[in-house]
Structure formats: structure tokens, C-alpha cells
Amino acid sequence: MNKHPPMNIKPLPLLPPKFEGDRSVLQVFKERKSSREFSSKELPLQILSDLLWAANGINRPDSDHKTAPSAMNTQEIDIYLAKADGLYLFDAKQNILVPVAKEDMRALTGFQPFVKEAPLNLVYVADFSKTGKTGSDANDYANIDTGFISENVYLYCAFAGLSTVVRGWIDKPVLAIAMKLRPDQKIILAQTVGYPKM
């Protein structure tokens, strides 16, 4: 787990996932798409909780295995959440959001205008201290593992009627400094999530 300086903000407990719905998996695949238009409406806690569980939550508590696979089960991808009220880190084991910074960093998560208006930008960060590996293999695995997670987000968004788009057009050095990442952490991609703009 990434160590951050203590803050006066308490962790935000998430809710257990709701396993309900009347749509087939194939229907969700049919509706999966990228969208770059978002409402600024906040996501309810249940939707946010379900989204993060689908993205990379623990689905087998006896082994801490997750909804998204990872190479050699290193589970090196951390999900940060850039929201209007600050930056958070998703802790899947405790099912909480850990506060990282009080600043609104949404505008730093990409160059597109919509990133600062949408309620949520997920930032996928590889923590290479978890893998014990460096170099091209470590980067390849991190890229692949991020792809698994981001596709889980796409499918959940299609199921829940949310808009999303995964993005690589980021000033990664600037964002990494703002997030206070260590040298062995690397931003891979970002993904915007929100309600469709009406």
C-alpha cells in the first residue's frame, strides 16, 4: 500500500456490491462504448462502490483474488480517484477510499476539457515495488493489467448507464508530482466516469 502523509480527512467506507440487475452479459457488451460528454452530477456511493468492486475489487476473499486478472497475481495496479473534493486511493482489501490529497486534481488527469467537469477520473498507477521486476516486462505486464481493469470499468458503466472513456493523453510527470508518487510508481492511463450529459 502506498504511504501518504496523514490527513485530517477520514477514509470513506464503501458499500458491499449489489448483485442485482435484469440485463444479460451480452446486452452489456452490446452497449459498451466510449463517450466524451459527461454530466457533472456526482455518483451515489452505491454506484461508486459497485464501480470500484467491478474494476478491481476482491471477489474471492479467502485468497484476496480480484475481479481483474494480473500477471503472476502481482496486483500491482492501484486505482486513484480524482474527485472534486480531493484525491483518493481505492483500498480493495478494506473496501474503503483512503484520502491522499485535498486538492481537486481532475484537470491534471488529461488535456481534454471534459476531465475537469466530470465527477470522477480514475488514474491507474503501477506500483513496481509489488512486482520485484523492472524494465520492459514489468511495463508490459502493467499495461496489460490496466487494460483488464479499464475494460471491467467499461462493462460496469454499460450496465449502469454511465459514460466512460479511457485516456492516455496525460502530462504524466506533472500529475505524478501532484500525486506525490514515488519513483517506483508509474501512471499508466486515466479513465473518466460519469453520467451522460443531457
Image: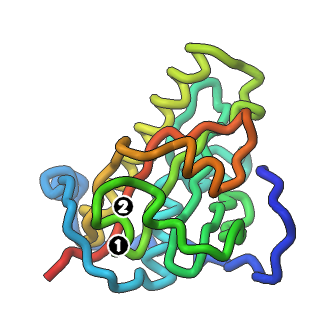
Residue 59 lies, in percent from the top left, at: 58, 54
Which residue, as the protein is rendered here, is positioned at the far front? Answer: 174
Left or right? Give the position of 53 relative to 64: left
Q: In which quarter of the image is the C terminus?
A: bottom left
Instruction: Classify mark 2: helix, strand or loop.
Output: strand
The quarter holding residue 115 reads: bottom left
Q: Name the one closer to the observer, 179 or 48.
A: 179
Q: In this view, does 141 lie above or below 82?
A: above
What amino acid is found at the position of numbered circle 2 in the picture? Thr
Instruction: Classify mark 1: helix, strand or loop.
Output: loop
| Residue at figure coordinates x 56%, y 33% from the top left | 70
Left or right? Give the position of 9 relative to 31: right
Residue marked by disc 2:
192
Left or right? Give the position of 49 relative to 117: right
Residue marked by disc 1:
118
What amino acid is found at the position of numbered circle 1 in the picture? Ala
Q: Name the one closer to the observer, 180 or 62.
A: 180
The quarter holding residue 104 reads: bottom right
Residue 186 lies, in percent from the top left, at: 61, 37
| Residue at figure coordinates x 82%, y 75% from the top left | 7
Residue 192 lies, in percent from the top left, at: 36, 61
The quarter holding residue 94 reads: bottom right
Which residue, as the protein is rendered here, is positioned at the far right? Answer: 6
Q: Name the one closer to the observer, 189 or 90.
A: 189
| Residue at figure coordinates x 43%, y 69% from the top left | 120
* Label 1 – label 2 distance at C-alpha: 7 Å
Q: In this view, does 18 lie above or below 82?
A: below
**Tags 1 and 2 in contact by the CB under 8 Å rule?**
yes
